[in-house]
Amino acid sequence: MPSKTSSANSAGSKGNASDHPEDIIPMVLTSATQELFGCRADEDVTAENPYKLLKKDDILEDMKTKAAVSDFSPVKQIVLDYPESELLLVFDRDFTYGQCFYLVVTPEAKERILNPPEPEPEEDFNELIIKTPEPKEWISLGSEREIDEESVRETRAKLLYKFSRARKEFGKPVSFSDRNVADAKDGNLECASYQDRRFNLKLMQRDCAVQAIPILRSNSAQTQWKYMKNNCTQYTPVELDQNDKDKTLEPQNISDFCNTVTGRVLHALQQEEIMNVFKDDWMDLGTETEDIEWSGKVSDILMLYQAFTDQKYSQDKEICCMHWHPTIHGVIAVSLTENTQQLTRSTGPLIAFYSFSDPTHAKILLECPDDILAFEFCPSDPNIIVGGCLNGQVVLWEISAYVPRLLPVPPGAKTESVKTGMLDFEDKKGSNAPMVRYSAMSGVENSHTGPITDVHWLPPTFEVNAQGMPVENKYNISVQLITCSPDGSLMFWDIRVPKQLQRQMASDKKQNDSEPQMADYSDNNPFKHLERSWKPLFKVATVNMDRSREYAPLKFSLDPYIRNNTSVSETTEDREPMPDYSQLQVPSGKELTPLEDVNTKIYVGTEDGEIVYTDWKLEKNDLDQLLNPKPLHCFRIHPCLVNTIDRSPFFKDIVLTGTSLYGSCNLAIWKEEVLDGPLFLLPTLDGLCTVACWSLTRPAFFFVGKGDGKIEVWNLLEKTGEAMHVQEHMSNGKITCIEPKIFSSKQHFLAVGDDVGVVRVFQIPPVFYTASRNERLHMSKCLEQQEARLNDLMIRRELWQNQPGLEEDKKVESKKPDSTTEEADEMKEYDDFLVLEENVLKGMGLTT
């Protein structure tokens, strides 16, 4: 019997059942197993007839077919040792032992349950002698005196209040109306919070980071450069009188003037064809940030280059996500969602594409079933876009048919504008952007139960199977993506055709070839196979260390390559042409080779301010069951929800995180595989930190967007306690997202989106994008120093905690009350009470 007992305990551990008899085992049976053995709940077995005899051979055949996946695999040894040919399965409708079924594992228990013994006759309780306990004599030990001292008695007379109403008011009809909240007389009274002086915590220990920096001294010489100012002057133009005009317009004077300037004009035109005479050659003399212009000035201001808005679609909308187009110059896509302050919905949620050629009108619009909080272009094909909805569904678009509208108009090309009158300068129809319907959408039953807050494509160098193991990607294109939601899960999705659906589509194609077909745009949809059948490849729950609860992820970041592996990117000439996604089929797991050099660990930021470092590969327990992986480490650094997780483009193992809360220590910089804490804790002195991102050209620079419309520029090699540059009034509202972009060696842009639907593109000055000499090497050394400082801090903290007698001293010191302060506070509260009592008595007329 020892083997049966251990098996029973392992099987019973699936539920939250209490102790159960040793001769039964609670079981969890799936719907497929119930239908196979004819024991469907509330159909084949009910509360009135809960018994079902299962043949031993059928159970052994099921375990042989399904192996470890079988529901009877935990009781395999018990079934083999059972002496009889049939086992009893009982339907436990009330979940007495924690599960819906339990299996009887001994013949004696089976006989006892099927043939219960007859109940014994009830005893005659009248014959029983009821003995009344006799009380003992009470002996006083002085407790009545203590009770009398602690009892509360009324010492003053009760106050009598009388409420009356005029008789004419009885039966009077009542008229209800809306109350004006703005009126102080009619409005609600606010109970504002206040600080309780009686509750005070004494800070015994403070953790603070100290960084040694060289002493800097600023010197200046000659004339100081003043800040640039915008000035304007209003003037009146000088006009010629009528005689001078007539004299100037004489034919002879005009002819003489033309003959005089013709040579110089022709010479200027020839020079313009030969070279650009307006080019500033002084800008090409220096390439470092230390080199300045010939005038001695260095501009460090983000200059406004372009602003995108559409009064029809983006007015009073909030921009939740924003991405530059990967291949088309000057095109940016933004997600427009309803602002929470707007009570009425003007237009539905959209993804709008803007272009530098027409900043006031959207080029194309992507139709969304719900607000899109995150979207991303496919790395292999930028015409494919995936987005995550507020209701938890995943949406896919294919915009290859609308790419010509995004391309810039070549100079000299004729536009299709139609002029119908002197006041019509453009075609009104041309300003209407086409609405692109989504190509596929996941079902509600197969999607997240919460809003999708982040989505990322897997790189084309690998793919994952149903267990999360990285395998080779034969197509060498991105076909899988990851989504996260505060419902506590990460979902992996595949956009290829499953095997069973491939066979069904082949049979339907043969049947439809014999029938005439009508031309339909939906036939050109390469993702038609995903409609109403798109399911996640597998799901990973972000559980905590003891699996008692799940985290609520908002953002995540992954670096799929290990530190000592560098991937070789293919050139455009070597890359194969893009295949048709409707012809791609999910390969069998046996055909793919597992990859060992892929890093499957990710950083996850939660809505509680936690930074979780976990693995997405599912773990196996002793019974070969797949379980959600435990996090490698969890840090509670941020006080509120995490809104930014961004990897450095220069150091793939460096991650920047941020949170949106007023206060300090809202930004942190982490290094992967360093599980002792963040390398940097950066304070934000004022304002709400809403978003942050790394610079694409300078390893030590990153940009921070604030809730009051400011942009902060940080340089970790210069200052770690405050921003190097703060520029105000960048937006009229709260900055919700920022996105840098490199257009050329002399053009670096920073796109800024806000909560009022406006996208502003600022030109980054050279001092912010031109790296200094060996800046990457200096930043690498700075990160190494911070890592060494963190290791030394952990060692010293461990030594400090292990000092003998330290904890006792801390406890004694914390228990010492501050008698002087407490007595003063109590006396002040008592005086306030006496004044309040006197005022109440005077108001009631009980005293003078």
Image (cartoon, rainbow, N blue to C red):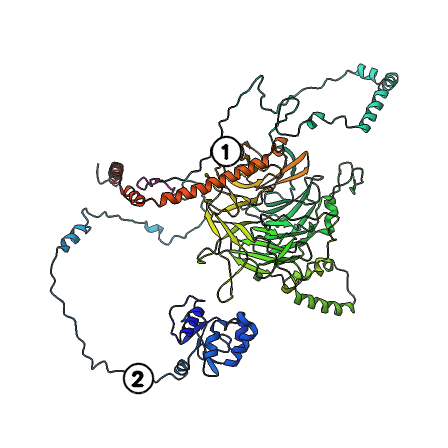
Vertical relation: 93 (above or below) 804: below
Residue 822 location (% of width, % of height): 26, 39
- In the figure, is residue 302 to the left or right of 383? left
Amino acid on which the number 1 mark rests in the picture = Glu
Q: Which numbered disc flags the more N-terminal residue, 1 or 2?
A: 2
The question of residue 190 being in magenta is answered with yes
Q: Is residue 451 visible?
A: no
Which quarter of the rendered picture does the N terminus lie within?
bottom left
Vertical relation: 445 (above or below) 259: below
Q: Residue at x 44, y 50 (%)?
A: 176
The question of residue 332 being in magenta is answered with no
Amino acid on which the number 2 mark rests in the picture = Glu
Residue 457 location (% of width, % of height): 62, 52
Residue 742 location (% of width, % of height): 66, 39
Q: Which residue occupies the foreground of this view, 803 or 372?
A: 803
- In the figure, is residue 281 to the left or right of 111? right
Q: Which mark is residue 120?
A: 2
- In the figure, is residue 423 to the left or right of 669? right
**Which type of secondary structure does the marked residue at label 1 adopt?**
loop
Q: Is residue 305 visible?
A: yes
Vertical relation: 643 (above or below) 273: below
Cβ atoms at labels 1 and 2 below 8 Å apart: no
Q: Nearer the viewer, mark 1 or mark 2?
A: 1
**SS assignment for the magenta stretch, majority:** loop
Q: Residues within 10 Å of mark 1 (few under 14, many from 20)?
A: some
Residue under pointer 1? 722
User: Over which residues does the magenta segment extend?
Assistant: 189-204
Q: CA distance from mark 1 to mark 2?
A: 85 Å
Q: Residue at x 50, y 78 (%)?
A: 44
